[in-house]
Image: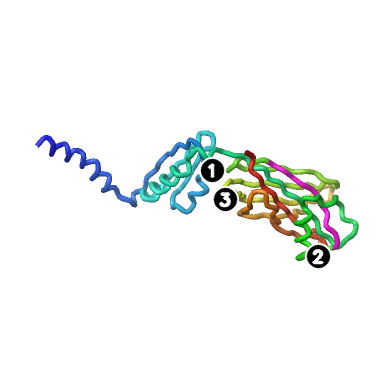
Amino acid sequence: MKQLFLCLACAVPLLAQNSQDPNERIQKLITLKYADPQSVQNLLSDFGVERRWDQNLKVIALSGRRANVMTAEDAIKQLDVPSAVHKDIDLTVYFVVGSDQSNVTGSAIPSDLQSTVATLKTTFPFKTYTLLDALSLRSRSGASADTSGVLSGNRITQFRVRAATLEPNSMIRLDMLRAGLRTPVSAGEGKTSYIDTGINTDVVDVKEGQKLVVGRSSVDGPDKALFLVLIARVVE
C-alpha cells in the first residue's frame, strides 16, 4: 500500500503538467549565457510570441500562448551555446560613381575593386567609374552601428545598420542598411537643405569576404549613378 501511495504521489505533478492548457497566455523570462539577446530575438520572429530583451542584463522576456512560448524557449536553448559568443563584424562600403561626364570628382578605383567594377560595366556601360568615398565601421554581432564622412563642398557620406548578425555558413545578415550621399543646396535666406542620394534596404545577406553591389541610385540625372559596394568580414 505504501508503494502504491508513492506512485500516485509522483503521478499527480505529471497529470497537472499534462493538463496545462496550450492556449493559455503566459510570460517567461529567460537569461542567456552566451548568445546575444537581440540576435536571438530576431530569429524568433516566426514563433508567434511577443519578445522584449535587455542587452545589458542578457535576458529575453517572452509572452504568448503556452505552446508557442515553450517552443521558443526550446529554440533559445539550442542557440545559447558557447559557440554563440559575440564576434565583431567589420563592414566597408565603397561609394562608386559611374558617369558619362569627364569631370567627375573622385579617385581611381582601387585594385581590389577592379573586378567588381568590370562586372558593373557589362550592365551599366558608363564612360568612367571613380571612387567617391569609402566608409568602414565595426559592429558587434547583433548590434547597430553607424559612421559618416565629409567630402568637398560639405557633402556628407553616411553608412549605418540597425543590426549586423553572424549566421551559419559564413553568411552575415544586415538589417535596415542605409548608405548614401547628402548634398547641400541653398534653400534661400541663408538656409541650407540637403538632397539625399543612396540606398535603403530592409535586409541584406552577404557572404563573408564577398564584394556585393548593394544597389544603384541616380545622381544629378540619368548620366551619373551611385553604386554601393559592400564587403563584410568577421573579426576572430
Height in image: 181 above or below 6?
Answer: below
> In this figure, which residue is indicated by the disc labeled 3?
169
Q: Does dot 2 land on a helix, a strand or a loop?
A: loop
Q: Which one is closest to the eye, mark 2 or mark 3?
A: 3
Instruction: Tell me the crowding category of disc 1: few under 14, some 14 to 19, or many 20 or more residues within 10 angstroms, Cα based.
Output: many
- Mark 2 closeness class: few <14, some 14–19, many ≥20 residues within 10 Å: some
Quarter of the image that includes the N terminus: top left
Distance in Å between CA atoms under marks 1 and 2: 42 Å
Please tell me how crowded label 3 is: few (under 14), some (14-19), or many (20+) other residues with Cα within 10 Å.
Answer: few
Q: Hey, what amino acid is under mark 3? A: Asn
| Front-lying residue, 109 or 63 | 109
Question: Considering only order in the chain, which callout, 3 or 1, is on the residue closer to the N terminus?
Answer: 1
Q: Which residue position is annotated with label 2? A: 125
CB within 8 Å, label 2 to label 3 = no
Which amino acid lies under the numbered mark 2 shown in the image of this protein?
A: Pro
Q: Which residue is mark 1?
A: 38
Compute the Cα span from label 2 to label 3. 34 Å
Task: Answer with left or right where residue 3 lies relative to residue 130.
Answer: left
Q: Residue at x 77, y 54 (%)?
A: 195
The answer to which of marks 2 and 3 sits earlier in the sequence is 2
Indicate the position of residue 44 as horizontal and vertical percent values: 48, 49
What range is drawn magenta here?
Answer: 127-137
Residue 134 colored magenta?
yes
**Label 1 amino acid?**
Gln
Q: Nearer the viewer, mark 1 or mark 3?
A: 3
**Quadrant for the C terminus in the image:** top right
In the foreground, 128 or 218: 128
Question: In the structure shown, which secondary structural element does the residue marked by tag 3 occupy?
Answer: loop
- Give the x, y percent position of residue 93: 72, 49
- SS class of the residue under badge 1? helix
Compared to residue 215, the image places residue 56 above or below, namely: above
Q: Is residue 114 left or right of residue 37?
A: right
